[in-house]
Image: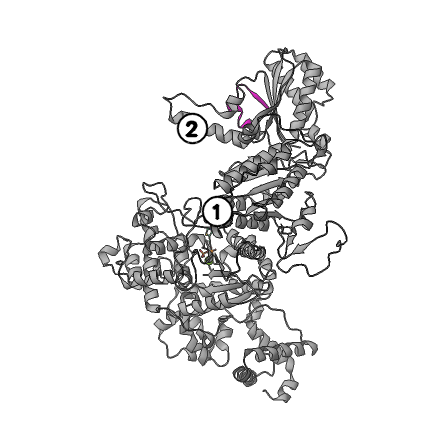
Amino acid sequence: MPQANRMNRDPSDVMNNDTTAVNDGITLNNGTTDDNATHIPVPHGLDDLEVREWLESLDSVLESSGSEVATEILERLRAHATVSGIDLPFTANTPYANTIPARLEPLFPGNQELERRIKSLIRWNALAMVVRANRVEHNIGGHISTYASAATLYEVGFNHFFRARTDEFEGDTVYFQGHAAPGIYARAFLEGRISAQKLENFRRELKPGGGLSSYPHPWLMPDFWEFPTVSMGLSPLMAIYQARFARYLEDRGLKPATDAKVWAFLGDGETDEPESLGAITLASRERLDNLIFVVNCNLQRLDGPVRGNGQIIQELESAFRGAGWNVIKVLWGSEWDPILERDTEGLLVKRMGELVDGEYQKLVVESGAYVRQHFFGSDPRLLQLVEPLPDEALRRLRLGGHDPRKVYAAYKAAVEHKGRPTVILARTIKGYGLGEAGEGKNVTHQQKKLNEEELQEFRSRFGIPLNDQDCIEVPFYRPAEDSVEIQYLRARREALGGYVPQRSVRSQPLVADHDELFNEFYEGSEGREVSTTMAYVGMLRKMLRDPEMGKLIVPIVPDEARTFGMESLFRTVGIYSSSGQRYQPVDVNTLLYYKEAKDGQILEEGITEAGSMASFIAAGTAYATHGINTIPFFIYYSMFGFQRIADFIWAAADSRTRGFLLGGTAGRTTLSGEGLQHQDGNSHVLALPVPNLRAYDPAFAYEIAVIIQDGIRRMYKDGESTFYYITLMNEPYAMPAMPGEVKDGILRGMYKFRASENKKSKLRAQLFGSGSILREALQAQDILEQKYGVAADVWSVTSYKALYTDAIETERWNRLHSGEPPRVPYVTQSLADAPGALVAATDYLKTLPSMVSKWMPRRLAALGTDGFGRSEGRQALRNFFEVDARFIALAALHELQQDGKIEPGVVTKAIKDLGIDPEKPNPVTS
Ligand SMILES: Cc1ncc(C[n+]2csc(CCOP(=O)(O)OP(=O)(O)O)c2C)c(N)n1
Ligand SMILES: [Mg+2]
């Protein structure tokens, strides 16, 4: 121990300086760089000897009593310092060093040399794939440098950790960094799973025989990729909820508990996306030790350094540690170990913490002499440490993320860690091995072409058995089937259960038709006023009780269950909580108390539509991931769906997610009072681009029943890769009984709901309504008939998207089969005998009905809610947006006038009689 009198003499000096060293003196807790921190003057009176004594005494405690005792002493010292009035700066950082010291590294279990050769071949083929593709098709793109930096991170995983999905074991789940796809393909090529032809057609998927998608896309390669990852930031968040969903399935008894892991590989630049770190506290709160993040810290993103003036690794460490994660830094390769061992004073670690990332990047591209002068040259004692090493050796001091032994140690520690998720921060070089062609350079992300010399250099660097001439052709190279490399690679995968990634549907389809569940809703509410939301909740309640599918239902809600009248489900099926309910709920004495339970069924996600969507994706793809047909019903405030998390919905579509999205409180004028932010007139338009999404805007309970029943059949019996968006409203009204055989029309997008009884009138109109606006059309029908003698039929348009999809498909078929009798779009067929004016009113943008008007027999007047919402009641809103019964009637009269069927004076009078202000503000622009 240091002498007591020294400590008494000036403890604050010692502690301050010591803490600064541990903090590495550069990254503050908020991740910013303090310029002064790098130059903290040595406090007066502190000499090196004193520091050395403290360090030595810690070493001796470590040696004699182990790290737990050493930690305890440091904790007490810190507490003592605090009560002694020393203001210790907060930091969640550890020094800029490997978390696992060399002496605690496990033995590397593989054949390192063989693994290196395999990895080199994969590097070559990944590069060849991109270079060849761009030779054939200029600017087809692709990325070399991301995989070049991540190769070791993946290969250690493939050879030692990633377990495949088998009949006996569910397997690990891996999210691959999107831009590293060439490396994953190149490995599959060596494994014999992807042909050279396919490799040749990387990024040219439309070539005969098919190609390979640019990035991971299950939609395009459904037997290979499981998860889309290339929209940055989505995969870390999806991985967290994936890991949590695995626990949910276990806690509910839907699958056995296993030690399967979820691995997510991400870029350091990617962590700037708010979604990347947005849910990390959920992972620690839920103690997801089945989750491992690997951040490829090559310190670069697309344009340049991630944190040129700071340290991204320290910043991430502090964020993850602060959030309660187990953080493992893999910064330095084995070559550094003997140097670090010689550094008894901690000068080297201190120096390592001093450089900003921009400086580190420069060291990568510079010579050994430069490294000596600019890195070690800051202190003669550091220079002394590396004196025996020639310049070339200094250049070859590898980073941790390129050293399989270090990476293996980190992965092993991660899979064995209990109680917390782990993040591995691995330092690498972007474009590793590309040399002059881009290693560590700012342009490396975009590098797709190498000249002859660069190719030869890369070939030599990684020992690819190709001569100078062959090499410049950049051929794919696969050693013979019986070569040691292929044998080894196959054996490793066999030991880990098979190949990864691999996607297959492994669930059993549902068997029953479930008519009995839905029949009740065909009857109507017998005059009782209910909203479509209430009707839906009633359906959900019944489905939850169904013997076959009840347990498979996953209700998901982001803190809106009460809004949607779902609170009765709290009690009946419980809210999922991995720790059960450790408190007595405040409302325990009420019937509908807030019941949390370990086997609770509802995923009450709190206020995170993104997180809820990630749960939706996990549950909706469990048929492939886990072989379990879970059926997610995710209900949310409709404005916060497509508008807010459309990219997750796109990822769900790509992932072949099945399930039901329910946009609650939908419709710009149907949601009263909430105003501009909440009133949704957009979502049905934003749902249009998602190809495999069926979007419905139903008005009545029986329509919802028909749609959900059909959805369950399609997705869970017939295995269709489709999913649903259904808008629900909170406007109460009597639900009518289903008027005859209209199921087919409901599903295809429209059906006649109420025909006019007036068969004699020459003035005719067809009114199209959807959702609660359908009731306005029904009122308009009465106005037209009673006041103006116009006989109008009313149609419920349940899905403009379905009408549109059918029409463009039919039109296309006709164009391609011009010699054959033309087919007729469903909307045209439906309106074959529908005379008179055509008027559509929707609670969404006018473009929705307008987009199908060209397949209607005549001109269409479209009313909709373009513009910003207002805080008001429904009636005033429908007047403001001009979608109420009066405006529908007016539109019909105006159409008839245009057709010369009625006099203009009738319309002018109607405007007055209906109380419409012709000079009212335009809702679109006001
Ligand atoms: C949401 C989103 N924004 C932008 C991009 C375009 N993009 C692709 S790669 C890249 C840089 C990636 O940097 P990093 O995450 O550090 O990965 P690295 O390639 O360095 O491993 C960018 C900006 C994207 N794919 N997704
Ligand atoms: Mg990067």
Q: Is residue 917 left or right of residue 815?
A: right
Q: Nearer the viewer, residue 688 or 631?
A: 631
> Residue beneath label 2, please?
812
Q: Is residue 728 above or below residue 819?
A: below
Mark 2 neighbour density, 10 Å: few (under 14) some (14–19) many (20 or more): few
Q: Secondary structure at mark 1?
A: loop
Is any atom of residue 312 visible in this view? Answer: yes
Whether residue 77 is in magenta: the answer is no
The C terminus sits in image quarter = top right
Range of the magenta residues? 850-861
Image quadrant of residue 392?
Answer: bottom left
Q: Is residue 910 above or below residue 315?
A: above
Which of the 4 image quadrants contains residue 841?
A: top right
Residue 478 drawn at (x, y percent): 28, 56
Closer to the chain start, of discs 2 and 1, is 1
Nearer to the camera, 566 or 560: 566
- The answer for how far apart the CA atoms under marks 2 and 1 are is 36 Å
